[in-house]
Amino acid sequence: MSDPTEEIPEVDYVEGTGVPIRGNDIDTDQIIPARFMKVVTFDGLGEFAFFDLRFDDDDNEKDHPLNEERFQDANVMVVNNNFGCGSSREHAPQALMRWGIDAIIGEGFAEIFAGNCLALGIPTLTADHETINALQQWVDNNPDGDIEVDVAAETVRYGGHEISVSVDDAQRKALVEGIWDTTALMKANRNAIEETAGDLPYLDQTRSGVEADD
């Protein structure tokens, strides 16, 4: 049984180095090709992130940021517009998280993709094209440069610059207050949920007893 006192971490600040992923309309099939989704768990998906963009049919490396040694420890991804479009597969943010990504800054995100990121505690922050382009160029020139993402204040600091970014209000509240993991939240409040359910007149109060006798 899960610990009913399990705490959900607040995600109000992310710090680390960046990796630029350029291009609009990068869909979830590019982020994690469908053939790698035939797994029982999400473990190990990280190595297949952007696989078809990183390797040719003979598994030779292509020119891609995730193949570059200088970006191997990056945890802040900087993308362009409509990132994560296409199918709603949750494997896409799962693959990015397991590759090591803790936050994504971009021009725009597909709504379902952003929601799937939130379920993993990964903030998706937006800014205009010029701002993102400048950040991508800086990251390219400074792969070891520190990026500070302040989710609560909606700012990003890098290389002596501070830029304003936007975070969906509901997402920011969930991340900053530590209520983004709905499964853990339900487990943490299991006793209260059971007590409330027990007081509801339309629930079959004999169900648990019947199951116990089976």
Image: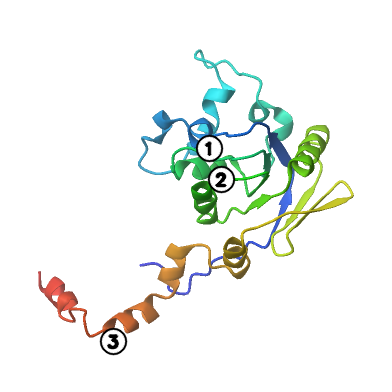
Q: What whole-number distance in Å separates the C-alpha atoms at marks 2 and 3?
A: 40 Å
What's the residue type where badge 1 is placed?
Answer: Gly
Query: What's the distance in space between the residues labelled 2 and 1, CA to CA?
Result: 7 Å
Q: Position of residue 159 (x, y in %)?
A: 87, 46
Going by the numbered disc 3, the residue's amino acid type is Asp
Instruction: Name which residue lies at 58% across and 39% down.
Output: 99
Q: Are marks 2 and 1 in contact (CB under 8 Å)?
A: yes
Q: Circle 1 sits on which residue?
A: 46
Q: Quadrant of the C terminus?
A: bottom left
The first of marks 2 and 3 along the sequence is: 2
* Residue 184 point in image, percent of width and height: 45, 65
Q: Image point 60% across, 18% down: which residue? A: 61
Any part of residue 3 in sight: no
| Mark 2 lies on residue | 97
Compared to residue 55, the image places residue 70 above or below, namely below
Q: Secondary structure at mark 1?
A: helix
Q: Of residues 93 and 40, which is closer to you in this image?
A: 93
Q: Is residue 200 visible?
A: yes
Label 2 vs label 3, nearer the camera: 3
Q: Is residue 190 above or below residue 150?
A: below
In the rendered image, the residue lying farthest to the right is 160
Residue 149: image location, x then y, percent: 73, 54
Residue 60: quarter of image: top right
Percent of width and height locating residue 164 = 78, 55
Amino acid at circle 2: Met
Q: Which mark is residue 199?
A: 3
Q: Is residue 113 above or below residue 208?
A: above
* 37 in relation to 177, above or below: above
Using residue 85 as the reference point, say whether residue 209 is left or right of it.
left
